[in-house]
Image (cartoon, rainbow, N blue to C red):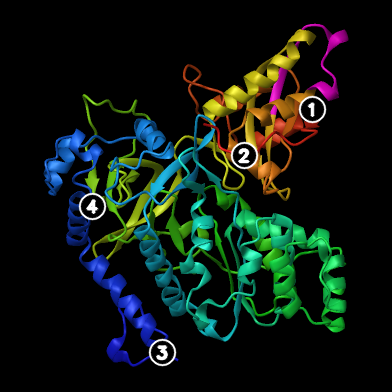
Amino acid sequence: MAVDSAISSPLGPPACEKDAKALRFIEEMTRNADSVQEQVLSDILTQNSQTEYLRRFKLNRATDRDSFKSKLPVIAYEDLQPEIQRIANGDRSAILSAHPISEFLTSSGTSAGERKLMPTIKEELDRRQLLYSLLMPVMNLYVPGLDKGKGLYFLFVKSETRTPGGLLARPVLTSYYKSEHFKTRPYDPYNVYTSPNEAILCSDSFQSMYTQMLCGLQDRHQVLRVGAVFASGLLRAIRFLQLNWRQLSQDIETGTLNQKVTDPSLRECMGKILKPDPELARFVRHECSKESWEGIITRIWPNTKYLDVIVTGAMAQYIPTLDYYSGGLPKACTMYASSECYFGLNLNPMCKPSEVSYTIMPNMAYFEFLPHDPNSAGFTRDSPPKLVDLVDVEIGKEYELVITTYAGLCRYRVGDILRVTGFHNSAPQFHFVRRKNVLLSIDSDKTDEAELQKAVENASRLLREFNTSVVEYTSYADTKTIPGHYVIYWELLVKDAANSPTDDVLKQCCLAMEESMNSVYRQGRVADNSIGPLEIRVVKNGTFEELMDYAISRGASINQYKVPRCVNFTPIMELLDSRVVSTHFSPALPHWTPERRR
């Protein structure tokens, strides 16, 4: 029931007093966005005034915006790599941050084929926890009664490594799930999960998924929302159920746990949860053995009110499949965050995916915005860009996000392109457009044009002994399969038809391309099972000329036409697929180990 209107919020009537406090905080931060930003910058510059990085640019303890903007350059990851490498190697001096770097968060963006290492400090966990605490108070404005059941969330930890200097390096969500903030979180009726901590924290992806699914099936009538971090993760859970429902229903019927689950703490935990339930086992078998899986989420979890998944950016490609499995349930994108920083939240979480906008919370970091011009050649140190402050962005314009964080990133280009859609009070709201320069993405992988080019070059070396070369190529991320996979279209020049490359050779080309991909892609293939085998589709000679003719017929300039290295426009893909003469899949997993290269 909503609380007394005396503590109501402009966002709507809060569900309880705790929610009212959270909503008041959102209003206060967004009403005073510019003064909050000014204070955040002053706090960051004061805290880190004696760091090597700020001293290098002779800031001389100044904390005002003008000094900051005139003296500090706008940078990318490559500019910081020497400092990050020193910290990774064990240098504990105040290089970027006055507070000790507690660990590195590994970004899914890549640098020279490896995950980027983002420095963080212990107090950032409190800041991230604060943003998490605002999500349910907002959701409760739109969906009543979420305290009367549970959330079925498929959450996983990923592999972690240590740098040469002994610091942990791991994804931001792995860091959060393994923190005391998560493990010993206070009871909150709005945040009860079906999955026990032991299942979420199990590093074996099969055992973790198996036990989370088992718990979700046992609690099926109590589940009010179903989610994962990314849309791809939720679809992977559905695929897992398709492959394993027989064993899961056997475990439910007998109340005993599959022997493939070997983790001792997980077996002990599940021993307390599992009880024989023949009726539920019959129901699971009945539903899962049906030929059609349309609406399977609401068939098994009938009280589900919405899906909690990210479906913006590259994840939008999964929306039709989610609609198929869920019967068109609403899809809530609740927050916007990255390894570098947590940014903001969606104040209208039940809107259509195409209308999702995130309100930047001005207390999270200091934000600047670089006007985005896709045709610009960029900028140099001699001609620095004119950056715009948080409250000065303009509706309808696109910007690249630039952040300054408490952990020591200063005027750092995140690489996200955002479009301003409006304001909540004085805080702008942004639609996530895309990652800059990212060509292909299935899950948390991000492959850019240079990486794809390198992979094609490496694979095409295998064709030399057949006097064959790749004339042209393009690609797309096929998300109709679960897991999704990369599809590469090749047009080949075969100079000796009697000695053309065989199916086995082209399969090896697929594997050679995968070996050339960055470590995030290879981890998705090997450890996370979140990406399927790469596929090469060989097309007839002349196909790419037809592609050019089609583009020109639609208004492209013949002088400026370039073959698109990634396609997703249906008529173009239909043209390509109608010209395919053979298909080949990677025959094995690429090499990947969790150890970080020095």
Q: Which residue is mark 1?
A: 507
| Earlier sequence position, callout 2 versus callout 3 | 3
Mark 4 surroundings: few (<14), some (14-19) or many (≥20) residues within 10 A: many
Marked residue nearer the N-terminal end (4 or 2): 4
Q: Is residue 294 left or right of residue 566?
A: right
Q: Secondary structure at mark 4?
A: helix
Q: Callout 3, which amino acid?
A: Ala
- The mark nearer the N terminus, 1 or 3, is 3
Q: For the residues marked 4 and 2, what is the alpha-carbon distance in whole angstroms? A: 35 Å
Q: In the rendering, at what x and y percent does residue 207 appear? A: 73, 60
Location of mark 2 (residue): 521
Q: Note whether residue 290 is visible.
A: no
Instruction: Report the mark closest to the observer, 1 or 3.
Output: 1
Please report the residue visible at 34 percent of the width from the left and 60 percent of the height from the top.
Answer: 123
CA–CA distance in space, label 1 to label 3? 61 Å
The residues bearing labels 4 and 1 have C-alpha atoms spaced at a distance of: 52 Å
The magenta stretch spans which residues?
Answer: 489-505
Q: Is mark 4 in CB contact (under 8 Å) with mark 3?
A: no
Nearer the observer: mark 4 or 3; the answer is 4
Q: Please tell me whether mark 1 or mark 2 is closer to you in this view.
A: 2
